[in-house]
Image (cartoon, grey):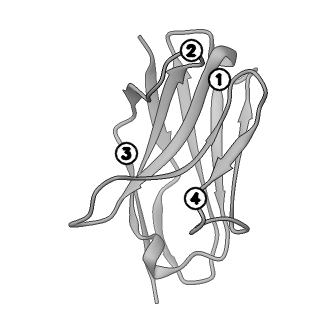
Amino acid sequence: QVQLVESGGGLVQAGDSLRLSCAASGRIFSILDMGWFRQASGKEREFVVDILGRAGRTYYADSVKGRFTISRDNAKNTVYLQMNSLKPEDTAVYYCAAKPVTAPEYGYWGQGTQVTVSS
């Protein structure tokens, strides 16, 4: 089992920055792929970015490329999402997700943290 706890959400203005954190516990963090997803009101949850456990490679949704940066600190069992140049369309509940590197899909989820960007 993996437990995930997000923090760092809030209300900001367009153009501002936020950093989300996700602390993981329960399994060896370094062999987990970690990701961020988001769900806006009335929409389906969508992929934002992830970072692989072994190679550290990252994959970004086109909508956030150049503005968001994912990083991980294996010593702290934490993954971060630095969000810059925020737009109103980034408003959503952001979820941290985890999976073993050998698993095909994300199966562990945090409780979510609200990010609201005002125009």
How far apart, in angstroms, are the residues tagged by discs 4 and 1? 24 Å
Mark nearer the N terminus (2 vs 4): 4
In the rendered image, the quadrant that contains the N terminus is top left
Task: Say which residue label 4 marks.
Answer: 61
Relative to residue 67, is residue 61 depicted above or below? above
Amino acid of disc 4: Ala
Q: Amino acid at mark 1?
A: Asn
Residue 35 vertical position relative to residue 100 in the rendered view, above or below? below
Q: CA distance from mark 3 to mark 1?
A: 18 Å
- Label 3 element class: loop
Decide which of tag 2 and tag 3 comes sooner along the chain. Answer: 2
- Density class for disc 4 (Cα within 10 Å; few <14, some 14-19, many ≥20) is few
Looking at the rendered structure, the secondary structure element under dot 1 is loop
Identify the disc placed on residue 102.
2
Q: Judging from the image, what secondary structure is the residue with disc 4 in?
A: loop
Q: Which residue is mark 3?
A: 112
Mark 2 → mark 4, Cα distance in angstroms: 22 Å
Residue density around tag 1, few if under 14, some if 14–19, many if 20 or more, within 10 Å: some
The x, y position of residue 9, in whole percent, is 47, 57
Q: Say which element carries label 2.
A: loop
* Location of mark 1 (residue): 77
Label whose residue precedes the other's in the sequence (4 or 1) = 4
Q: Is residue 32 left or right of residue 89?
A: right
Residue contact at pointers 4 and 3, CB within 8 angstroms? no
Mark in the foreground, 2 or 3: 2
Q: CA distance from mark 4 to mark 3?
A: 19 Å
Q: Residue at x 64, y 36 (%)?
A: 79
- Report x, y in % for residue 69: 71, 55
Residue 106 found in image quarter: top left
Q: Residues within 10 Å of mark 3 (few under 14, many from 20)?
A: many
